[in-house]
Amino acid sequence: MSAKVTIVGRLGADPEMRSLANGDTLTSLRVVSSGRRQVDGKWVDVDTTWWRVTAFRQLAEGCVEALTKGDKVIIVGTIKESSWDKDGVKQTRLEVTADSIGKDIAGASRMQRVTKPETTDAWSTDPF
């Protein structure tokens, strides 16, 4: 099984980066997503799912620099099922290889605008 997915959730831990034998970098993320429902006048999490997400190369490095545990993120990637036998019992899990990852700013109380440095290069100016 392999399909494109979009996940909105929170990081359950800081991103963990490591180097591969070929020199590429890989970052592992644990992301939790859940719905919210009001039960007896209180909001509770429902349908909680933990996702194992992997990012490679430049995206992997960016995750470590920009994200920390608790950040709300949006991830677009490819989902794949992997399976193996453990003590004669078939185990399966879903894994996501990220194509893009960004912070979700919905509900953010205050954002800080990042300004671009001044440039005289005609190709790097935005005419709009």
Image (spheres, rainbow, N blue to C red):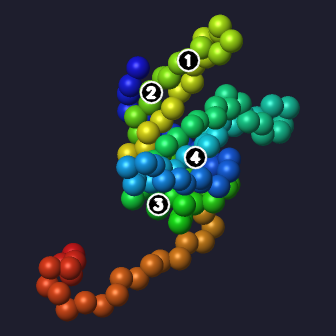
Side of 109 relative to 60 (left or right) = right
User: Tag 2, which secondary structure?
Assistant: strand
* Badge 4 amino acid: Leu
C-alpha span from label 4 to label 2? 15 Å
**Residue 56 in view of the camera:** no
**Residue 22 in view of the camera:** yes
Q: Residue at x 48, y 23 (%)?
A: 81
C-alpha span from label 3 to label 2? 22 Å
Of the pair 73 and 92, the residue shown nearer to us: 92
Of the pair 28 and 106, the residue shown nearer to us: 28
Quadrant location of the N terminus in the rendered image: top left
Camera-side mark, 4 or 1: 1
What residue sits right under mark 2 in the picture?
Answer: 80
Tally of numbered tags:
4
Camera-side mark, 3 or 1: 1
What residue sits right under mark 3 in the picture?
Answer: 61
In the rendered image, residue 104, in percent from the top left (x then y), is placed at 53, 55
Q: Residue at x 64, y 32 (%)?
A: 49
What residue sits right under mark 4 in the picture?
Answer: 29
User: Tag 1, which secondary structure?
Assistant: strand
Q: Residue at x 67, y 28 (%)?
A: 47
- Above or below, comparing residue 36 to residue 67 in the picture: above
Sequence-earlier tag: 3 or 4: 4
Quadrant location of the C terminus in the rendered image: bottom left
What residue sits right under mark 1 in the picture?
Answer: 84
Sequence-earlier tag: 4 or 2: 4
C-alpha span from label 4 to label 1? 21 Å
